[in-house]
Image (cartoon, rainbow, N blue to C red):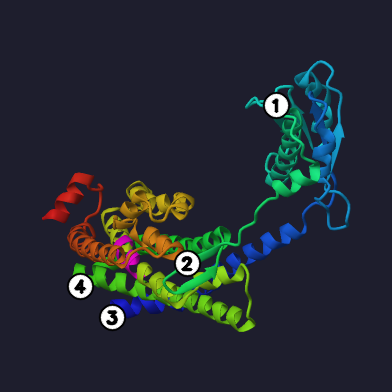
Amino acid sequence: MIVRREYRERVRKPSFWIGTLLFPTLMIGMIFAQLGFAMLESQETLRIALVDQTGRLHAAADLALADNKLKNGERQYELLQESVEGGAEAAFQRLRPKVLSGELFGVLTVGENIDADDNVHYYTKNVGNADATRDLERALSRALLELRIERASLSVTPDQIAKLTKRVEAQTVQVSEEGESRRGFFSAYFSTFIFVLLLYMSLLIYGIMMLQGVLEEKSSRIMEVLLGSVSPTELMTGKILGIGAVGLTQVLLYALTAGAARAWILARGAGGDMQGFVEGFSPLKLVFFVLFFVLGYFLYVSLFAAIGSVCNSMEEAQNLQTPVVMCLVIPMIATFLLLKQPDSTASIVFSLIPMFTPMVMFMRIMVLTPPWWQIALSLVLMVGTIWLVFRGVAKVFRIGVLMYGKRPTIPEIFRWARS
């Protein structure tokens, strides 16, 4: 009865379907927005001033930058040689007003000692343009290499230097038991981040939903009416299963959407980077996505139910829920680090801690499937933890849901759970 009531009430609300459609729509919108922003990239030539105290770098650096073109065929960078009178710092101070006014995009200064670590400085208002910084570094490195070769009296022409220092662009191919697939860091990171964000949002939203539901029924005394028909444990279990069924419905819709997108991409025969996304949406990974959502849901929602039962208002609940929410936030913060080293000792230990397992183990599976014994161990630890937490939460819920007035202290709550 409780399960049916919780499920029907929430699924029938327009907000459920709006939320279900809104999140994937936003994610897809973000993807196309990124592509759109890339297409709207500025088509203006960037003017860079070069203050070169060696007096030998401008021609080579300018030649190296000549290959960078805008869509209209014009040069992306214009490298201007500036006077070095008074030294690099004095030259920059003279050019500083032009940088601030936008007349110059940046100023590059190079000292006389080309082997010194702090010999090169790049001044600009927009340090977020990583592409420009990378292009300038590459061009200057090429020019400095030619100068070093010349000073070493080696007989090498600029063309030979270009061939000797030609940049290698490797095609990243992931090797796995299922075979090889072309997959770079971007596609691996992006597809993983989408699913981890879905897990994070789903666990947090349904946890808060449980918390608010318990608080509302407790404050409105509906809880006492319901407890006239069922026991506190049955009520809590019913609410968890009912809201869980709502969440599972939503997650299954996400998984089916991802599966349909994968089938569409495969049907079109898309290759290249899209192959990386296809790998991220494989049926096995979608199954793990649903599995870790279910396990994470029971663990986190049980804790939120306990918090709701011992509090009388959202203000009281905010302090208690912070540690639980942080357990969801920490894996999100560590996403980049964990994706870079999915098989490191820290990642393995992190993924076996039940509070972090749903998101961290899933990240590892998405990037580099860990040994099956680690996956099995994490599942066993999670199931055991859920069983222990559920038993403790049931005791806390039974006592807390009928208490009004002063909120119990943390030691009291733990004492109830152990009783």
What element does badge 3 sit on?
loop
Q: Nearer the viewer, mark 1 or mark 4?
A: 1
Residue at the spot of label 2: 175
Residue at the spot of label 4: 228
* Residue type for callout 3: Met
Magenta residues, dominant SS class: helix
Q: Nearer the viewer, mark 3 or mark 2?
A: 2
* Residue type for callout 4: Gly
Distance CA(mark 3)–CA(mark 2): 50 Å
The answer to whether the residues at label 1 and label 4 have Cβ atoms under 8 Å apart is: no
- Measured as percent of width and height from the top left, residue 197 is found at 48, 61
Q: Which residues are magenta?
A: 294-300
* Residue type for callout 1: Ile
Say which residue appears at 25% left-offset and 68% top-offset. 236
Residue at the spot of label 1: 114
Does the magenta portion include 393?
A: no
Kindly identify which numbered label has been placed on residue 378: none
What element does badge 1 sit on?
loop
What element does badge 4 sit on?
loop
Residue at the spot of label 3: 1
Which sits earlier in the primary sequence, circle 1 or circle 4? 1
